[in-house]
Amino acid sequence: MFNFRLKVFYTVARRLNFTKASEELLISQPAVTKHIKELETRFNLALFDRQGNKVTLSPAGEVLLRHTEKIHEIYRQLEFDLNQLNATLQGTLHVGSSTSITQYILPPLLAKFHKIHQDVKVELFSGNSEQIEQALLNKDIELGIVEGKLKKREMHYTPFLKDEIVLVCSSKNSSIKKDEILPEELKNIPLLLREPGSGTLEVIANALKEKGIRLSDLIIEMQLGSTEAIKSYLQHSNCMAFVSLHTIFEELQNGDLKIIEVKKMSIPRHFYFIRRQGPEGGLPSLFIQFLIHSYRS
């Protein structure tokens, strides 16, 4: 329903790149340029400033983008409400989720959702929590699912499910002879950590801080961008790592990894749905309620 010419402008304005906009819209770059020129002719104003390969919004473009965003949201809500009256649900929902959630939590739930709502297309973007939050602020996605709660005022948080961060190592690790250590002993153990911007890393840093331990106090052998990479690394080293309990069920069952308790230290957390502040409803709310109900049942 969204006017296609405005959709072209909206896509270019978000990407600030005509080539990427044409790829996303599945039309040629000359066609993108033609639609933008027709809008500029209609309003007798330049919508973009072009300096070499750099594209920025002009003052007129910034005004049009603000109104186009509102129109886009109105159309999305209108389509959802009318489809509900017709007992059908259609549309595209752009979701972003943290890497671990994408890999270990969402796939079976997405399959179940698709069986019931076959006319709803879910486009999933994966990254660390910081990247998901930025995508939400940039309006590249309508809904995020992240590890931990950063309490940003621009966002509304809805609890999804409980998790726990645990310290693990390979069951073949020859450097550890006990199943429990003191927090201070962490300073003498080579550790693997997630990359900066990871929600898991932030939760770990906060938990250690409560015990008077800073990340700079630790022997950090390497920072890796995924839990799978960390688990694989552990199998070939005497390192330890803090990981989500949800990500290691299979390895614990198979005896590949073992949990090392840290005395008087637990790291519970929640996974959260995040949305921009504002009216709720539409496909994001439907998706949230479905996932919460499905995971509990």
Image (cartoon, grey):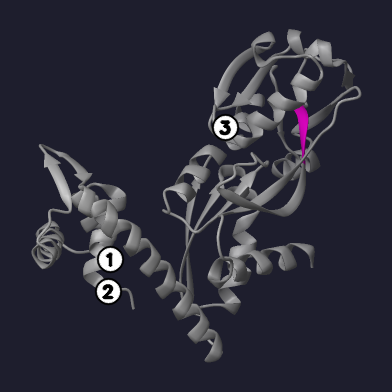
What amino acid is at disc 2? Asn
Residue, disc 2: 3
Q: Which residue sits at x=90%, y=22%?
A: 263
Please give left or right for residue 150 compared with residue 12 in the image: right
Q: For the residues marked 1 and 3, what is the alpha-carbon distance in whole angstroms? A: 39 Å
Q: Viewer-nearest of labels 1 and 3?
A: 1
Q: Residue 245: x and y, percent?
A: 76, 40
Bounds of the magenta span? 164-169
Q: Which residue is mark 1?
A: 7
Q: Is residue 115 above or below residue 62?
A: below
Q: State the residue in front, 25 or 3.
A: 3
In this view, 124 is above or below 283: above
Are the two marked residues, 1 and 2, in contact with CB atoms closer than 8 angstroms?
yes
Looking at the image, tell me whether mark 2 or mark 3 is earlier in sequence order. 2
Chief SS of the magenta region: strand
Mark 3, residue position: 229
Residue 55 placement: quadrant: top left
Examine the structure image and report whether residue 166 is included in the region drawn in magenta: yes
In the image, is 101 to the left or to the right of 140?
Answer: right
Q: Is residue 108 left or right of residue 180?
A: left
Q: Residues within 10 Å of mark 2 (few under 14, many from 20)?
A: few
Q: CA distance from mark 1 to mark 2?
A: 6 Å
Q: Residue at x 14, y 38 (%)?
A: 53
Q: Position of residue 173 (x, y in %)?
A: 75, 19
Q: How many marks?
A: 3
Q: At 72% from the left edge and 40% from the top edge, which residue is drawn?
A: 248
